Image (cartoon, helix red, strand yellow):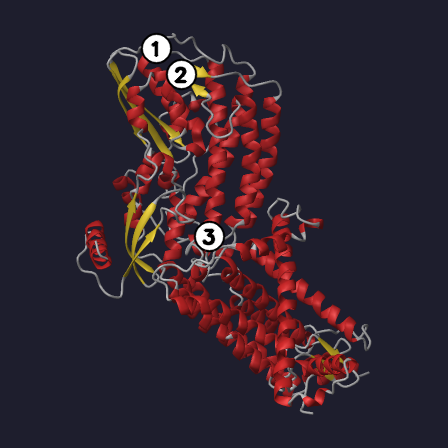
């Protein structure tokens, strides 16, 4: 057997058991085919998990927005309006898929898939829980370059957005696409730098190692006085990465009608919609794992992988609620202000934080200070 | 025509429209409206843009033209009254008042004190309701959706109050020639005063939510700056004029309905957050005006306690004013709303002309928009607070 992650192993043993019921040995399937098969199953699982959670987030967003805006929000379809998103999904599925005249049909049709695929693929490297016995993260692809893979793979999403804006044959869409291109270069650098700090402290690019390192309440957030600032940079840049208010410039419904997805309808539109929430989840998950201990709650969860999973979900939900809260409170920044923020504020700040945290870590400042305080 | 010919024709049309033959390849024409979320109705602005920066802007109006002035010449004086509602539909009471006053001045009608005070109350309440929309939609323009809903919460209460007094929620037709249609119902006063108490508390909330928000200030200060000279040149009135620091309010400077009896301030722009006459100043003038209107309403209610007369003067069935002309300008939420009527002694006006504040305020867009970014253009258009129903009439 080749080196495999926990999830792939679980899929393997399920298949083994299923085929065993009909008396077939799994080894007769060539390994190359099995790899593809398991990958597809895992991707399907991730995809449906994301789709389901997006439904929950949309409902959450609309209910919280309703509360903030002195109205009810959806409360008619199902208990507390929980099925509203399901109803909306069916509506979107049934809608006509309009491709405007003059649009580049291939790119127009292909763009939503690239956008969604980039984000969903990134989830493969996210450990949803942690196995304390074997010391492995419960994830689809347990690779050493975890965060490196994630940051590079979500960058493909931008290509999809630019494709969508360009292929739409609509000037407002084109503006949305250009804004996205301008925005991405201003937030990617601080985002990358802010992620670099926890990576440096943990000493590994793998998110599972980051979780392992923080078990028992030893969260990275309070490893050094620089970490809260680093988290702030990460969160702000992450918001820009999700195209969420106050950085929703590529959409900017009051300026660009609907930005890059002005011309999209039906299912293709819902892909963009899902991408937004999926990347919110991704940013929240990375934030929770890199700064707030992942599935750890001061060691209270013990060795239970399920509890760790639930704790991580709660942390993600809290983060998403904050994002929703920000969106419905703040006005939108202007495009030059976003770039100023990225280049002139966040990037230098992130560099200083990196430098500070490095020095702090190299000099074992925590130990020294604690030692000094404990001195009789 | 073949596709190519159509395209050529489009290009020619565009050049004629823009008045420019020198189309640089790196500039782009973009049609903002009439179906754009931030043009506050059916305004269409043709923008020439260089990247995000607007280099030229041409507002096109007329998508909501309903021949209101011509209708006014074809109908009896009394029958035209409801049409004024449809002009500035956010401040229908004020429009009613402007028309009623011009006809009264033409006919030399005396209005009872009670009617006058009821008019002032209702008109000032409508000013608040109208500025609430200006506040809310300005938040929308800047990308903050929540203030809009908060503004609507209060406007909803106001519309209920209007409904109580006249039965309508948008097109009131309440202020009529000779006074107002009916007296305030029992307990209406207390409801209004109750509402004003709540409103003033929420006014502070609005400011915490939007006015003093750092992002909002960054977005609205220092853009769309209008100098006092430009105000005079373009004939700006209302908050657009006062935002540039010019203290001119018809209620105070050319008092009608006895506005001089009331104690109220005329807020002017101070350039607090940036340059004098920027978008934030205009926005702030509207915010403060809401409070001042509330002040006037309270005082008017005090006077109403002892007011003599009925809610309406006696108006003859067949209304035929003498030969002559009259112009009355009143302070609408958006500026000076003027009605000019020329009478030839018949049942209809011979000529009716409206001086719409939105129409005049809109004219400066061509001057303000070039040089701003697209996002700013939205903010500048929002800060003019136009109602296309009245621009196009």
Question: SS at mark 3?
Answer: helix
Q: Which subunit holds the residue at mark 2?
A: B
- Tell me if B39 is positioned left or right of A77 in this view: left
Taking the spot 30% from the left edge, 54% from the top edge, the residue there is B47
Q: Quadrant of the C terminus of chain B?
A: top left
Taking the spot 50% from the left edge, 44% from the top edge, the residue there is B136
| CA–CA distance in space, label 3 to label 2 | 41 Å
Q: Which class describes the residues within 10 Å of circle 3: few (<14), some (14-19), or many (20+)? A: many
| CA–CA distance in space, label 3 to label 1 | 49 Å
* Disc assigned to residue B319: 1
Q: Which residue is mark 2?
A: B177
Q: Are marks 3 and 2 on the same chain?
A: yes
Outermost residue on the left side: it is: B21
Q: Is residue A234 above or below residue A204?
A: above
Quadrant of residue B219 in the image? bottom left
| CA–CA distance in space, label 2 to label 1 | 10 Å
- Tell me if B315 is positioned left or right of B294 in this view: left
Q: Nearer the viewer, residue B40 or B95?
A: B40
- Earlier sequence position, callout 3 versus callout 2: 3
Q: Which residue is mark 3?
A: B142
Query: Which numbered mark, 3 or 1, is in the foreground of this view?
Result: 1
* Disc assigned to residue B175: none
């Amino acid at each position: 057997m080749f080196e495999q992650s926990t999830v792939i192993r679980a899929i393997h043993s399920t298949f083994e058991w299923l085929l065993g019921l009909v008396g077939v040995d799994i080894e007769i399937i060539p390994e190359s085919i099995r790899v593809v098969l398991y990958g597809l199953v895992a991707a399907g699982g991730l995809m449906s998990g994301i789709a389901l959670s997006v439904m929950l987030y949309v409902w959450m967003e609309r209910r919280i927005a309703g509360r903030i805006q002195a109205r009810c929000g959806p409360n008619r379809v199902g208990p507390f309006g929980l099925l509203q998103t399901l109803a909306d999904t069916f509506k979107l599925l049934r809608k006509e898929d309009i491709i405007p005249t003059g649009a580049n049909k291939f790119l127009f049709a292909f763009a939503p898939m690239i956008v969604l695929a980039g984000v969903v693929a990134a989830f493969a490297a996210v450990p949803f829980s942690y196995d304390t016995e074997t010391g492995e993260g419960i994830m689809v692809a347990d690779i050493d370059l975890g965060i490196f893979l994630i940051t590079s793979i979500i960058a493909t999403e931008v290509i999809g957005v630019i494709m969508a804006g360009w292929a739409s044959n609509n000037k407002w869409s084109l503006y949305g696409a250009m804004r996205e291109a301008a925005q991405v270069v201003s937030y990617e650098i601080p985002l990358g730098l802010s992620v670099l700090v926890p990576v440096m402290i943990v000493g590994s690019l793998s998110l599972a190692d980051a979780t392992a390192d923080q078990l028992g309440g030893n969260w990275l957030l309070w490893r050094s006085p620089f970490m809260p600032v680093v988290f702030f940079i990460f969160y702000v840049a992450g918001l820009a990465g999700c195209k969420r208010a106050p950085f929703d410039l590529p959409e900017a419904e009051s300026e660009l009608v609907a930005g890059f997805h002005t011309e999209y309808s039906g299912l293709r539109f819902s892909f963009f919609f899902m991408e937004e929430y999926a990347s919110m989840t991704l940013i929240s998950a990375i934030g929770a794992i890199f700064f707030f201990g992942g599935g750890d709650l001061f060691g209270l969860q013990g060795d239970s992988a399920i509890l760790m999973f639930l704790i991580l979900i709660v942390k993600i939900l809290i983060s998403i609620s904050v994002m929703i809260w920000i969106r419905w409170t703040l006005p939108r920044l202007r495009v030059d202000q976003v770039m100023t923020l990225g280049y002139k504020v966040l990037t230098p700040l992130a560099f200083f934080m990196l430098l500070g945290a490095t020095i702090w870590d190299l000099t074992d400042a925590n130990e020294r200070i604690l030692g000094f305080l404990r001195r009789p | 025509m073949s596709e190519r010919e159509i395209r050529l024709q489009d290009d020619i049309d565009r050049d004629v429209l823009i008045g420019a033959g020198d189309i640089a390849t790196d500039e782009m024409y973009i049609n903002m409206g009439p179906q754009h979320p931030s043009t506050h109705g059916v305004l269409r602005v043709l923008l020439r843009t260089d990247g995000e920066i607007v280099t030229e802007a041409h507002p096109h109006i007329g998508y909501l033209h309903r021949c209101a002035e011509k209708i006014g010449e074809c109908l009896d004086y009394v029958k035209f009254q409801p049409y004024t509602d449809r002009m500035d539909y956010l401040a229908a009471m004020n429009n009613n008042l402007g028309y009623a006053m011009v006809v009264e001045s033409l006919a030399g009608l005396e209005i009872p004190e009670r009617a006058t005070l009821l008019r002032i109350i209702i008109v000032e309440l409508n000013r608040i309701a109208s500025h609430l929309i200006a506040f809310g939609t300005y938040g929308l323009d800047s990308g903050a959706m929540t203030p809009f809903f908060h503004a609507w919460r209060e406007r909803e209460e106001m519309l209920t109050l209007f409904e109580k007094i006249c039965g309508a929620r948008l097109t009131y037709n309440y202020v009529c020639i000779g006074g107002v249609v009916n007296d305030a119902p029992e307990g209406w006063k207390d409801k209004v005063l109750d509402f004003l108490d709540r409103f003033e508390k929420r006014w502070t909330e609005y400011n915490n939510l939007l006015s003093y928000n750092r992002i909002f200030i960054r977005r609205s200060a220092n853009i769309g700056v209008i100098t006092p000279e430009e105000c005079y040149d373009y004939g700006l009135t209302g908050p657009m004029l006062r935002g540039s620091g010019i203290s001119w309010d018809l209620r105070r400077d050319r008092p009608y309905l006895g506005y001089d009896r009331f104690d109220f301030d005329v807020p002017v722009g101070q350039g607090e957050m940036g340059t004098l006459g920027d978008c934030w100043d205009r926005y702030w003038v509207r915010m403060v005006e809401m409070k001042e209107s509330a002040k006037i309403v309270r005082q008017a209610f005090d006077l109403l306690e002892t007011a003599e007369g009925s809610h309406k003067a006696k108006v003859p069935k067949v209304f035929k004013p003498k030969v002559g002309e009259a112009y009355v300008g009143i302070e609408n939420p958006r500026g000076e709303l003027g009605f000019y009527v020329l009478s030839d002694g018949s049942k209809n006006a011979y000529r009716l002309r409206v001086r719409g504040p939105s129409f005049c305020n809109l004219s400066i867009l061509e001057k303000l928009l070039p040089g701003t970014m697209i996002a700013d253009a939205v903010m500048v258009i929002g800060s003019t607070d136009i109602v296309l129903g009245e621009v196009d009439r």
